Image (cartoon, grey):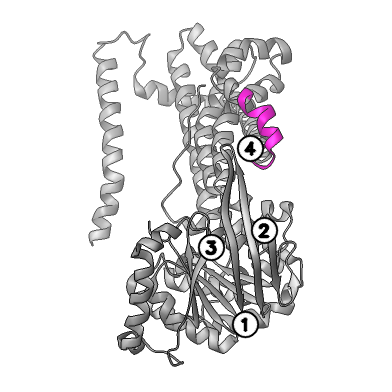
């Protein structure tokens, strides 16, 4: 029975938190403490989500955002892992690249969004580039730390057995770096949507960013908030996917995760 | 001689000039002998280990393994570290086979021996387990099985029990003696524990630091097979006291033995 009570507590407390928030929002809107054109009541937002889901407009805007975000996330993360591996493995790559990469890290990535727009336009290309840039650094920093933390004794053992560099990398260093790499991937998944939405603010005819801006311009705040809520849910879903993948791949770690190294300016 | 070390010296080049790590190291191991290297941390024990496995080249001097000079990495030397250094994503059996895979040899051919070795180290039913499902002492046994695979000419152990709790450590000492007599391998055992060195060894080589060199060799004439009761013998205490005095005496500190 104790576990059941614990289970109920696990669900009940967060649910109660959301309920209180929604109730306060509802009361504030109905009592007109805030003008309804600035804060529509929650039921209107829910109705807006329902309507756009049924008539397909939500999916029309969500689809391009999801596509660009996923492609940018995967591409940015793969490039980050590859570059981190090269920097960790070859001294000359580290000398040639690391300083510049760290300098680039301090640039807020969204500040180049207008440039990216001019270079690549409002097609998927520009969004992928900005998403990729934003996702790059958290994965890069964590992957680099992971590759560098490889156990020197284990590497000695492999070298003494006659293993080559490629063998050691593939069988020891890469799997050994999975834990920090996933820590970086978890951070990046939250950032990825930012890059895509910002690009859609700047110029787009579709996408969640466009939907939010278009709705706000026409004072359809219920629709605007719907899009924001959907984006939040998409972010949660993405995070859950990465966590599940992590638990599957790093089965030996149990619940304890690796600490995240560094963070990124978006 | 299974292992012969002749006038071995190693000088590291550092930013503050040459740093001699080892100087005039001379010793030999007979086949099947159990020899401990006893010394304080920083005396160059780990450097010596890298030289014997061919991962480092000496500045001068020679190392011969079963008559042949060591000139590069030696897959026929088994190594056991202080940490088990297992791959957590591989099952116990695959961990034992890791060096075979690294050598690019046929894994299937060594499978039976790997299973036999797991039985010998007392883990017959754990081949399919993952390392995180094993205790620290059990993980270290897997490391020993891995090192013994392929019947190495020499088993190098670098403070293998230092990270274990005192009780597991005593069990592992007996287990190691049992495994050693069952396998007939030659062991070079690096430690900074005096009773451990005396209990396990045929001979104890005492190392001094900066630069590392052998300052004394002590033969341990205690009957084998040994049990923990040997530790209560007067002779055992005398050996320990003698070794301890080396680390305390003024002449010892001149050698850099004391720290």
Same chain under badges 1 and 3? The reply is yes
SS for dot 3: strand
Question: Would residue A32 be visible to someone looking at this image?
Answer: yes
Q: Earlier in the sequence, mark 2 or mark 1?
A: 1
SS for dot 4: helix
Magenta-colored span:
A87-100
SS for dot 1: loop
Magenta-drawn stretch contains A88? yes
Asked whether disc 1 touches disc 4, contact meaning CB atoms under 8 Å apart, the reply is no
SS for dot 2: loop
The reply, left or right, for residue A168 in relation to residue B230 is: right
Asked whether disc 1 touches disc 3, contact meaning CB atoms under 8 Å apart, the reply is no
Residue at the spot of label 4: A84
Asked whether disc 2 touches disc 1, contact meaning CB atoms under 8 Å apart, the reply is no
Residue B69 location in percent, x, y? 75, 69
The reply, left or right, for residue A17 in relation to residue A44 is: left
Residue at the spot of label 3: B213
Asked whether disc 3 touches disc 2, contact meaning CB atoms under 8 Å apart, the reply is no
Asked whether disc 4 touches disc 3, contact meaning CB atoms under 8 Å apart, the reply is no
Magenta-drawn stretch contains B189? no
Q: CA distance from mark 1 to mark 3?
A: 20 Å
Residue at 69% across, 28% down? A96
Residue at 47% across, 17% down? A224
Residue at the spot of label 1: B30
Residue B114 location in percent, x, y? 63, 79
Q: Can you say which quadrant of the picture contains the N terminus of chain A? A: bottom left
Of badges 4 and 3, nearer the viewer stands 3
Question: Would residue A60 be visible to someone looking at this image?
Answer: no
């Amino acid at each position: 029975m104790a576990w059941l009570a614990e289970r109920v507590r696990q669900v009940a407390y967060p649910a109660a938190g959301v309920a209180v928030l929604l109730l306060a929002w509802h009361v504030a809107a109905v009592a007109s403490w805030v003008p309804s054109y600035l804060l529509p009541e929650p039921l209107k937002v829910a109705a807006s989500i329902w309507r756009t889901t049924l008539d397909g407009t939500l999916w029309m805007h969500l689809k391009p955002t999801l596509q660009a975000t996923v492609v940018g996330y995967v591409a940015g993360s793969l490039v980050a892992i590859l570059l981190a591996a090269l920097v960790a493995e070859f001294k000359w790559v580290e000398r040639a690249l690391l300083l510049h990469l760290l300098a680039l890290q301090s640039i807020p990535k969204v500040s180049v969004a207008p440039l990216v727009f001019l270079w690549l336009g409002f097609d998927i290309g520009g969004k992928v580039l900005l998403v990729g840039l934003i996702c790059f650094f958290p994965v890069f920093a964590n992957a680099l730390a992971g590759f560098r933390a490889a156990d020197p004794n284990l590497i000695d053992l492999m070298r003494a057995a006659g293993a080559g560099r490629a063998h050691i990398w593939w069988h020891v260093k890469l799997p050994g770096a999975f834990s920090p790499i996933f820590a970086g991937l978890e951070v990046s998944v939250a950032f990825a949507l930012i890059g895509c939405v910002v690009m859609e603010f700047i110029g787009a005819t579709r996408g969640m960013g466009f939907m939010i801006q278009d709705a706000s311009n026409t004072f359809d705040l219920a629709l605007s908030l719907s899009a924001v809520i959907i984006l939040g849910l998409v972010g949660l879903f993405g995070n859950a996917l990465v966590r599940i993948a992590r638990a599957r791949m790093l089965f030996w770690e149990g619940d304890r995760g690796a600490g995240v190294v560094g963070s990124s300016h978006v | 001689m299974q292992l012969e070390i002749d006038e071995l010296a190693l000088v590291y080049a550092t930013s503050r000039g040459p740093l001699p790590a080892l100087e005039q190291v001379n010793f030999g191991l007979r086949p099947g002998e159990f020899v401990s290297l006893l010394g304080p941390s920083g005396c160059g024990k780990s450097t010596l280990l890298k030289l014997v496995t061919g991962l480092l080249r000496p500045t001068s001097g020679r190392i011969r393994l079963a008559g042949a000079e060591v000139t590069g990495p030696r897959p026929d030397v088994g190594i056991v570290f202080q940490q088990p250094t297992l791959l957590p994503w591989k099952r116990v059996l695959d961990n034992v086979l890791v060096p075979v895979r690294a050598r690019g040899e046929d894994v299937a051919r060594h499978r039976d021996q790997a299973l036999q070795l797991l039985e010998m180290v007392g883990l017959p039913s754990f081949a399919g387990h993952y390392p995180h499902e094993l205790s620290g002492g059990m993980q270290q046994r897997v490391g020993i099985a891995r090192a013994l695979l392929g019947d190495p000419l020499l088993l190098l152990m670098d403070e293998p029990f230092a990270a274990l709790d005192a009780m597991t450590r005593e069990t592992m000492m007996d287990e190691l003696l049992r495994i050693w007599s069952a396998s007939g391998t030659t062991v070079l055992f690096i430690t900074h524990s005096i009773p451990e060195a005396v209990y396990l060894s045929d001979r104890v080589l005492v190392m001094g630091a900066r630069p590392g060199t052998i300052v004394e060799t002590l033969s341990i004439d205690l009957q084998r097979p040994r049990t923990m009761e040997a530790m209560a013998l007067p002779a055992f205490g005398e050996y320990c006291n003698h070794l301890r005095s080396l680390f305390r005496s003024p002449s010892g500190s001149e050698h850099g033995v004391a720290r």
